[in-house]
Amino acid sequence: MTPKISVLMPVYNAEKYVSLAVDSILNQTFLDFEFIVINDGSTDGTLDILQRYAQQDSRIRLISRENKGLVATLNEGLALAKAPLIARMDADDIALPERFSKQYKYLNKNTEVVLVGGRCVAIDSCGDSMALWNQLTSFDDIQDQHLNSLNGSAVAHPSMMFRKEVVQAVGGYLAESYPAEDLDLLLRVSDEGSIENLEDVILKYRVHAGSICANDKQKQNNQVYKIVNKARERKNLKPMVKTNADLQVAAQSVVSGFLMRGWWSLNAGYKKTAWKYACRSVMAAPLNLDVWRFVFCVVRGR
């Protein structure tokens, strides 16, 4: 029988977190899915972990081959998928148990919606909560951010569930858009129908030093600029004008990374996580005034 959902998860050198990701999919309350896991040439212990899972659950379709990169892996998974709906997943994130059930019901009820994400809790490498993301839920608000800012995607890539036929009709993922291939896909898909976010939190999205967005931020920002203007051109809108200076990304120091995560946590009300990053910031830069300003705000409770 054809499954109702095909779950697509590319994996590369994710042995530290992949078990948590796989468990979160296998423990969904919605059961009628196939789980396409593509090991993209991992060189650590990832494949051994995945093979053990594949032996235990017949819903897992494990493909392992040489490294081809993220975009090629995503398109390979799209071609393999049997279901009319595709759920994206990343190998370092955690899906909440009712994610598939809520998204499947929403897409069935709202036929004009071609892609739906959901709110996410950003977590750090230890799994501690730092922020609530994907606050925009309506199509109009999401489109406004995508077309009128350079803030990137308003729908977290691993939270997406979309109609396979629509994504294939617009050409799937484009290699030239990496590492902003998700925003490019969203903008092209939005020409075919509505894209929205559920108000429910459906995913824990891990932010850590090894993530793609951390390692390719400069390239990603430049790509976002190109992708947004290409979409604006399709809609006969004037291009956004940005100087090279506007697109520069300063190299992030260890302490600035701690402070960024700390402020996220404090502003979102995750005081325990904020305290953690306050302590790490003091240890990393005890004479830094910005560090002590942050410590004062944590003590005061913002």
Image: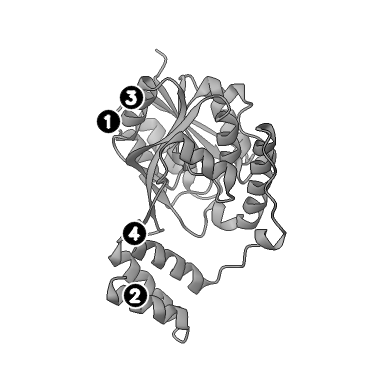
Reading the image, the residue beneath label 4 is 268
Of callouts 4 and 2, the N-terminal one: 4
Left or right: 52 with respect to 257? Answer: left
The one of 278 and 215 positioned closer to us in this rendering: 278
Residue 203, x across and y down, in percent: 37, 43
Residue 110 visible at all? yes
- Element type where label 1 sits in the image: loop
- What amino acid is found at the position of numbered circle 1 in the picture? Thr
- What amino acid is found at the position of numbered circle 4 in the picture? Ala
- What amino acid is found at the position of numbered circle 2 in the picture? Cys
Of callouts 4 and 3, the N-terminal one: 3
Q: Residues within 10 Å of mark 4 (few under 14, many from 20)?
A: some
Of callouts 1 and 4, the N-terminal one: 1
Determine which quarter of the picture holds residue 161: top left
Reading the image, the residue beneath label 3 is 105
Of callouts 2 and 3, the N-terminal one: 3
Residue 279 visible at all? no
Reading the image, the residue beneath label 2 is 297
Determine which quarter of the picture holds residue 247: bottom right
Of callouts 1 and 3, the N-terminal one: 1
Q: Are the residues flagged by discs 1 and 4 in contact, CB closer than 8 Å?
A: no
Reading the image, the residue beneath label 1 is 29
In this rendering, the label closer to the viewer, 1 or 4? 4
For the residues labelled 4 and 2, the Cα–Cα distance comes to 13 Å
